[in-house]
């Protein structure tokens, strides 16, 4: 299985052609049709929180590196993280507008609350690309993973893990933040696989995706259902999965039932190796981040053919229709394909995963 690596390679190849002017039908990147800006551009990057380590570890450095690469080291990325505070993010957006950045990549804390800021940016002539989460307001484009597919992959994995006991099994559903539109899409996708196949007895929407909130919710579910009556837990991401597992351990569980996750966080991969977490969803952050940088630079430089090639999908938000988009594919991550996903894509090394605590478990699945 090398689907993720192949998808990334294909994406990079397509983008490389565009950067060389092949898509535009011209001989070089400098000969495209009268760009709005040259290489001396500023990309404003607004990311939502730090609970998930991906934003500082992957998204920002990858986007920064790609923008430099695309602009002969003349472009720059101005980065701000909102720490899960929608008001703070709105202030950060206002500052970037005041500083006259050339384009904005916005991963919204609250997709609705950010809409006035998006309109303000547009009124100032600054294009806005919604990154990872679909912001409301007059955005120019959107790039994310296929979020309903993420939920479907999680739900399908849970049903498969339960096997013939699925229909009589009691399930707890730990969804993401109600202010994040992605969370609603994950839930919708998961329910399309779970409804009619399992018995969902408790459902929670987890404020701000915070693990401590998920842990409190799980403790409440354990009290209401009974620890040994919980056959599996749908957790929308890895941070919450870890908290759910901690809550069950603290309640005295002997064997952790199947628990899903998302993001392929390092500690989640280690839990999968150890058999504590059943699966995660691996999303190729390099593919998403590199293509987001390509979209931002193409938009600012007026490379409409390249931009259109990167945004072949169309999605609707509550305020806009037919938004040009790129939906990046995802992969179910289990102990069987760790080598072919996060290691092949150089997200982690075997050394990163197989620390002293996990060496025996790694050896047992051939991860050396």
Image (cartoon, rainbow, N blue to C red):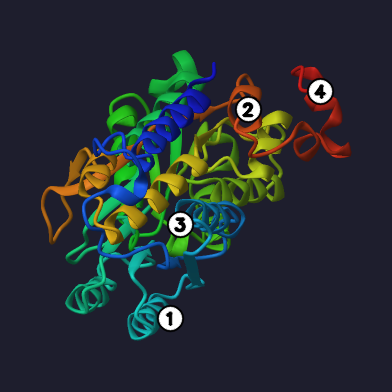
Percent x, y for residue 211?
A: 56, 58
Q: Which mark sits nearer the N-terminus, 3 or 1?
A: 3
Kind of element beneath mark 3: loop
State the mark number for residue 368.
4
Q: Which mark sits nearer the N-terminus, 4 or 1?
A: 1
State the mark number for residue 344.
2
Depth check, mark 2 against mark 1: the one in front is: 2
Confirm or deny contact between disc 4 and disc 1 (CB under 8 A).
Answer: no
State the mark number for residue 88.
1
Confirm or deny contact between disc 3 and disc 1 (CB under 8 A).
Answer: no
Relative height, residue 148 to residue 203 (above, below): above
Q: Which mark sits nearer the N-terminus, 3 or 2?
A: 3
Depth check, mark 3 against mark 2: the one in front is: 3
Question: At 85% from the left edge and 30% from the top edge, which residue is drawn?
Answer: 359
State the mark number for residue 71.
3
Marks 4 and 1 sit apart, C-alpha to C-alpha, by 44 Å
């Amino acid at each position: 299985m090398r689907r993720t690596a192949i998808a990334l390679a294909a994406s990079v190849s397509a983008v490389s052609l565009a950067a060389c002017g092949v898509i535009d039908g011209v001989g070089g990147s400098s000969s495209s049709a009268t760009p709005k800006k040259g290489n001396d551009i500023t990309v404003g990057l607004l990311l939502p929180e730090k609970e998930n380590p991906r934003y500082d570890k992957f998204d920002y450095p990858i986007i920064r590196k790609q923008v430099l690469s695309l602009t002969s080291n003349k472009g720059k990325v101005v980065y701000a993280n909102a720490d899960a505070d929608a008001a703070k993010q709105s202030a950060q957006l206002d500052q970037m507008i005041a500083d006259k950045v050339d384009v904005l990549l916005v991963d919204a804390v609250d997709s609705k609350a950010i809409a006035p800021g998006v309109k303000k940016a547009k009124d100032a002539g600054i294009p806005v690309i919604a990154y990872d989460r679909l912001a409301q307001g007059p955005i120019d484009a959107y790039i994310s993973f296929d979020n309903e597919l993420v939920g479907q992959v999680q739900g399908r994995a849970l049903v498969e893990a339960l096997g013939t006991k699925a229909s009589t099994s009691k399930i707890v559903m730990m969804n993401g933040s109600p202010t994040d539109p992605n969370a609603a899409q994950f839930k919708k996708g998961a329910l399309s696989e779970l409804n009619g196949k399992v018995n969902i007895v408790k459902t929670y929407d987890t404020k701000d995706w915070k693990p401590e909130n998920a842990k409190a919710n799980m403790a409440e579910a354990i009290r209401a259902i009974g620890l040994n009556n919980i056959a599996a837990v749908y957790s929308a991401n890895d941070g919450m999965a870890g908290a759910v597992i901690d809550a069950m351990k603290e309640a005295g569980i002997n064997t952790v039932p199947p628990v899903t996750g998302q993001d392929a966080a390092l500690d989640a991969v280690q839990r999968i190796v150890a058999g504590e977490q059943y699966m995660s969803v691996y999303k190729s952050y390099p593919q998403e981040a590199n293509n987001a940088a390509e979209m931002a630079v193409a938009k600012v430089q007026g490379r409409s053919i390249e931009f259109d090639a990167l945004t072949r999908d169309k999605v609707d938000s509550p305020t806009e229709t037919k938004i040009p988009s790129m939906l990046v594919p995802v992969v179910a991550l289990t102990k069987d394909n760790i080598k072919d996903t996060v290691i092949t894509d150089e997200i982690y090394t075997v050394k990163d995963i197989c620390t002293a605590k996990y060496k025996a478990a790694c050896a047992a699945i051939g991860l050396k």
